[in-house]
Image (spheres, helix red, strand yellow):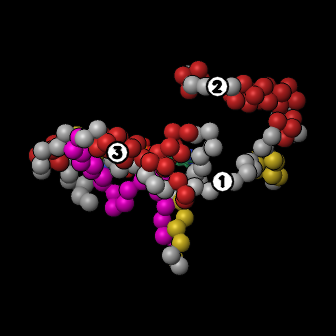
Amino acid sequence: MSTEITPQSATQAGAVDAVIVGAGFTGLSAALELALQGRSVRVIEREETIGDLASSFDIGDGKRLERFYHHWFSSDAEMIRLCESLGIAHLLEAHETRTGVYYANSVYRLSAPLDVLRFAPLPMRDRIRLGVLALRAQRVEHWRELE
Ligand SMILES: Cc1cc2nc3c(=O)[nH]c(=O)nc-3n(C[C@H](O)[C@H](O)[C@H](O)COP(=O)(O)OP(=O)(O)OC[C@H]3O[C@@H](n4cnc5c(N)ncnc54)[C@H](O)[C@@H]3O)c2cc1C
């Protein structure tokens, strides 16, 4: 794909309702939304591949590796609905949440409230604050509450 394509030249190349710059997750989702509303859309991307931050690359033997690690939570209902609508929900894999932190040559488990209480690098007062924050965060229903 050419870096010389601009929104202006892309629009001139043929009448479309919208030109989207960037074929990352956001651009592709926006294009899908518009297309579902019956609009004609052109997506322009400067890289050879799509997906950018959420993309993967070939590591040989037909295997691919994510450029960055990614997951969704089972509560990410919009994402799961999107996968269902695209007919790819069967490709999602559910795994138990296992989070750890590597700090000062040690790996600390950080998956459950008790793990936070055992997280020695933080003073006890801060462990409690972190635990309370995690509990409060579970009750957040809309991202605006975090602003
Ligand atoms: C380490 C890491 C971990 C993450 N983990 C998660 C996770 O677990 N779960 C999750 O949901 N999200 C996660 N994310 C976030 C997720 O990857 C991004 O939110 C998402 O991929 C961003 O998509 P985007 O389309 O907004 O941007 P990008 O992926 O950056 O895409 C932008 C695109 O626009 C193109 N572009 C820019 N300018 C131009 C131009 N002038 N002309 C043509 N093309 C242009 C770029 O080449 C690129 O392809 C993680 C991100 C990182 C870095």
Q: Is residue 50 magenta?
A: yes
Mark 3 and mark 1 in contact (Cβ < 8 Å)? Answer: no
* The N terminus, quarter of image: bottom left
Dot 1: what SS?
Answer: loop
Q: Of the residues tagged 2 and 3, which is closer to the observer?
A: 3
Identify residue type, mark 3.
Leu
Task: Give the mark nearest the N terminus, 2 or 3.
Answer: 3
Task: Specify the quadrant of the image occupied by residue 8.
Answer: top left
| Residue 27 seen from this side | no
Task: Specify the quadrant of the image occupied by residue 116.
Answer: top right
* The C terminus, quarter of image: top right
Taking the image as shown, residue 66 lies to the left or right of residue 27, namely right
Which numbered circle lies on residue 140? 2
Task: Give the mark nearest the N terminus, 1 or 3.
Answer: 3
Identify residue type, mark 1.
Ala
Q: Is residue 129 magenta?
A: no
Q: Which residue is mark 3?
A: 32
Q: Residue furthest bottom?
A: 61
Q: Which residues are magenta?
A: 39-59
- CB of residue at label 1: within 8 Å of ligand 1? no
Q: Residue at x 78, y 43 (%)?
A: 110
Q: Which residue is mark 1?
A: 94
